[in-house]
Amino acid sequence: MDSSTFIQLTDTSLKIGLGALIAALVAWLVLWRVGQPNNTSRENRRLLILEDVSAQVGAVTHIFAKYSSLVIESIQFGDRWPSARRQELDSVNTDLVNEFRKLADAEAKLLMLGEKNLERSLRLYGAKIAVFRKQVYVCRKDITHEQITTLKMGVHQVREQFYDMLSRKYDQLLASA
């Protein structure tokens, strides 16, 4: 065999071998990536659940704001408070009770995610609203505006603490996604 033929055969063999090695490496990388658990979809699902919890808390906050303004109005007007406003308060009160059921669902979602601290914080928020409702009710005459403001500020502080915790968790998930 001629030396130039041998070099050409060796060169061609090396090129074929190198091409096969590169193809095998690419195939192995593709199969390895397919076999890896997809953490991004799991983290995205957690993000969606946290966004849903936030929306549910936002709905409760909105209804509570309407409830508190109406009940404070009833205390200020006393017996002169119009019956139409009382009916509106009854409707808002029903809405608030319905939203509390959704708040319980949000707590369950947080527990499902293993977020016990967030769930406790959310439960505390609901409890503060319940205390407000027990202390501030229609046409109550023996409560001052300062006492009402203090109770309402307590509700707002607990809500802020919950959202601070939720925001930190959300940011952690975004950073790892």
Image (cartoon, rainbow, N blue to C red):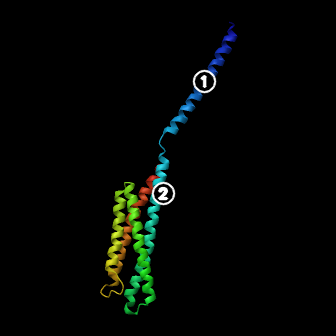
Q: In this figure, which residue is indicated by the disc labeled 1?
A: 18
Task: Tell me the residue at 52%/39% (across/down).
Answer: 34
Q: Badge 2 local density, few (<14 within 10 Å), some, or many (20+)?
A: few
Q: Label 1 sits on what residue type? A: Leu
Asked whether the viewer can see residue 162, the reply is: yes
Packing grade of label 1 (10 A; few <14, some 14-19, many >=20) is few
Rendering coords of residue 155 (x, y %): 36, 72
Is residue 81 depicted above or below 61 in this figure?
below
2 vs 1, front mark: 2
Residue extending furthest toward the bottom: 80
**Which sits earlier in the primary sequence, circle 2 or circle 1?**
1
Secondary structure found at label 2: helix
Q: Position of residue 44 (x, y in %)?
A: 49, 52
Q: Quadrant of residue 169?
A: bottom left
Q: Are marks 2 and 1 in contact (CB under 8 Å)?
A: no
Q: Secondary structure beneath disc 1?
A: helix
Give the left or right position of residue 4, taking residue 40 as reference: right
Q: Give how far across and how far down residue 156 sits, in percent.
A: 38, 71
Q: 90 or 52, which is in the foreground?
A: 90
**Camera-nearest residue between 96 and 153:** 96
- Quarter of the picture containing the N terminus is top right
Residue marked by disc 2: 48
Residue 150 makes an appearance in the image: no
Tag 2: amino acid: Leu
